[in-house]
Amino acid sequence: LEERHTAENIALGLEMIFFDWNLEEQIFAIVHDNASNMINAAENLQNINEHVNCAAHTLQLAVNDALQLENIAYVIQKARKIVGHFKHSTLAMQELHKTQIKFNLPQETLIQSCPTRWDSTYYMCELLQKNRTPILAVLNDTSITKPRQAQNLEITAIEWLTIEKLVTLLKPLQCATTVFCSSSEVTISLVRP
């Protein structure tokens, strides 16, 4: 929309699209995110019997709220620092790949989390957990990582346990998000009313 994204403008824009595509009598329900303007727009639409909040978006909002809890956010911030160190140091990344081979692990590049996609935090934590031993080996190697850097990147045993628990808790939610976000199948029937 070129206009402001008010409920009235969104409803009008959708009705124009329905008309242009000759769908006025064929739309029975609409799925939308949880923004109040979208909810109100759906309620303002003519001939729409039902509107449903997007389950994937609702799940994302709930997970994002949980990831903002102080102790969890702190551990995630430390995890991001470690990944950032390896992303910005070619030497550390090369040594990580060598060390992964020594420990019979696949050569994987660590993933940096993105605040707008909660599942990137899951992937980041999962890779950190899987590669904990090689990561610690590289961080403790003073020929690769300066002692002061290693000290700034240190994660305690309790924080590693938090990462492990996050992976366990987030995995089924990541699976649900993947199923909900299918673009080749209708997924509304997977969500309880």
Image (cartoon, grey):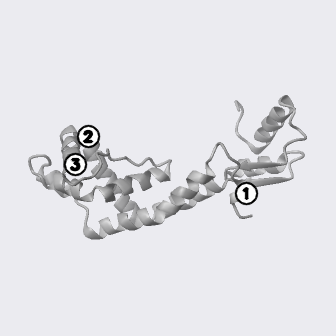
- Secondary element at tag 2: helix
Tag of residue 101: 3
Of badges 1 and 3, the one in the foreground is 3
| Residue at figure coordinates x 48%, y 60% from the top left | 171
Q: Quarter holding the N terminus?
A: top right
Query: Which amino acid does the dot numbered 3 rest on?
Result: Ile
Q: Is residue 78 visible in this depiction of the protein? A: no
State how far apart marks 2 and 1 are (Cα): 45 Å
| Residue at figure coordinates x 83%, y 33% from the top left | 16
Tag of residue 11: none
Which of the 4 image quarters holds residue 95? top left
Q: Is residue 191 visible in this depiction of the protein? A: yes
The residue that mark 1 highlights is 189
Which of the 4 image quarters holds residue 11? top right
Q: Where is residue 112 in the image (x, y as percent from the top left)?
A: 37, 47
The residue that mark 2 highlights is 88
- Secondary element at tag 1: helix
Of badges 2 and 3, the one in the foreground is 3
Query: Which amino acid does the dot numbered 2 rest on?
Result: His
